[in-house]
Every structure is written in structure tokens, then in C-alpha cells.
Image (cartoon, helix red, strand yellow):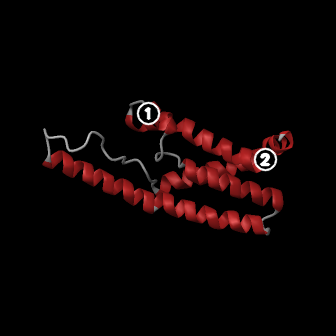
């Protein structure tokens, strides 16, 4: 079992992805503060927001694989395809789900004011704007370049 952990700890692609995700999550509260003048520390552990940690994680891993194994390797091609799926999901499906949650929350507030329908509102911070995704992509590529160099 120690060989497994030694290989895991030595895996630079895994570390590149971890650090990109970690940095993206840590900077979300300060960025939110500068945009809205309020601290939201729970954003460290939440989905959505600036930058996209999903995009940072997947692009960091993809870039690290390209730097390590070559940009013409089958592993890079697979990582690229998975990256496109994750990024599409972050800006498409998850963003639409967040927009729908926002509209449903407004409808419930307007229709049932004073009569709580549910104890918990739907989560609205699910997806990302294209700008948030681009910031995550840039962060991921930069982190991978630092880790693999």
C-alpha cells in the first residue's frame, strides 16, 4: 500500500489539479468582497462564482498532461475532450439550473409571502459566466505550468 501512496504523492498532474482548484476556491471570498463589499466565507466551499474552480481544475490537469506526456498523446486528447464537457456543463447546464432556481425562488417569495412553502431555498450559485470560466481556465493553465516546470 505504501507504493500506492508514494505514486499518488508523486503525481504532478494530480497536484496541479489540486492546487488550481484550491487557489480558485480560496480567492472566491476576496473577489466577491471587492465586487460587492461583503464577505461571504462560505464561497470557499461552494460551487459557482469567480473564478470557476471546475474549469481551473480540469484545465490544470489537461495542461499538465500535455506538458508531461506531450500534446499529441492519447491521454492529452482524452483530457481535452473531458475538459470541453466540464466547461460546457459549467457555462451551460449548471448555469441554466442556477437561473431556474433564481426564478423559482422569486416566484415562491411572491406567491407565498408569509406562508413558507419550503424551509430551504434552491441554490442559485451553480454555474458560471463565460468570464468566470475563462478566469478558471487561465488559472489552471498557469498553475500547471508552475507545477510541471
Q: What residue is shown at x 65% (from left), y 50% (from top)?
A: 140
Residue occupied by mark 1: 33
CA gap between label 1 and label 2 equals 32 Å
Q: Is residue 115 left or right of residue 27?
A: left
Mark 1 or mark 2, whichever is nearer to me = 2
Res 36 quadrant in image: top left
Q: Is residue 48 left or right of residue 124?
A: right
Q: What residue is shown at x 62% (from left), y 48% (from top)?
A: 139
Q: Which mark is residue 8?
A: none
**In the image shown, does 28 or 107 lie closer to the viewer?**
107
Q: How far across and down, in percent of the image, does residue 28 sit?
A: 50, 39
Q: Secondary structure at mark 2?
A: helix
Q: Is residue 146 left or right of residue 110?
A: right
**In the image shown, does 96 or 139 lie closer to the viewer?**
96
Q: What residue is shown at x 40% (from left), y 47% (from top)?
A: 125
Question: What is the total number of numbered labels drawn onto the structure image?
Answer: 2
Q: How far across and down, in percent of the image, does residue 87 sit?
A: 55, 60
Res 3 quadrant in image: top right
**In the image shown, does 71 or 97 lie closer to the viewer?**
97
Residue occupied by mark 2: 12
Tell me if mark 1 has few (under 14), some (14-19) or many (20+) residues whose alpha carbon lies within 10 angstroms of its own.
few
Q: How far across and down, in percent of the image, does residue 96 sit?
A: 38, 60
* The N terminus lies in quadrant: top right
Q: Is residue 126 left or right of residue 20?
A: left
Amino acid at each position: 500500500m505504501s507504493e500506492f501512496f508514494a505514486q499518488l504523492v508523486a503525481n504532478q498532474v494530480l497536484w496541479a489539479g489540486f492546487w488550481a482548484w484550491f487557489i480558485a476556491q480560496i480567492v472566491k471570498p476576496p473577489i466577491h468582497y471587492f465586487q460587492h463589499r461583503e464577505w461571504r466565507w462560505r464561497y470557499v466551499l461552494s460551487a459557482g462564482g469567480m473564478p470557476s474552480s471546475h474549469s481551473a481544475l480540469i484545465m490544470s490537469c489537461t495542461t499538465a498532461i500535455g506538458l508531461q506526456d506531450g500534446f499529441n498523446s492519447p491521454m492529452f486528447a482524452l483530457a481535452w475532450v473531458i475538459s470541453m464537457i466540464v466547461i460546457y456543463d459549467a457555462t451551460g447546464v449548471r448555469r441554466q439550473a442556477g437561473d431556474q432556481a433564481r426564478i423559482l425562488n422569486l416566484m415562491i417569495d411572491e406567491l407565498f409571502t408569509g406562508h413558507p412553502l419550503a424551509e430551504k431555498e434552491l441554490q442559485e450559485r451553480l454555474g458560471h459566466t463565460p468570464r468566470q470560466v475563462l478566469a478558471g481556465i487561465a488559472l489552471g493553465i498557469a498553475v500547471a505550468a508552475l507545477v510541471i516546470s
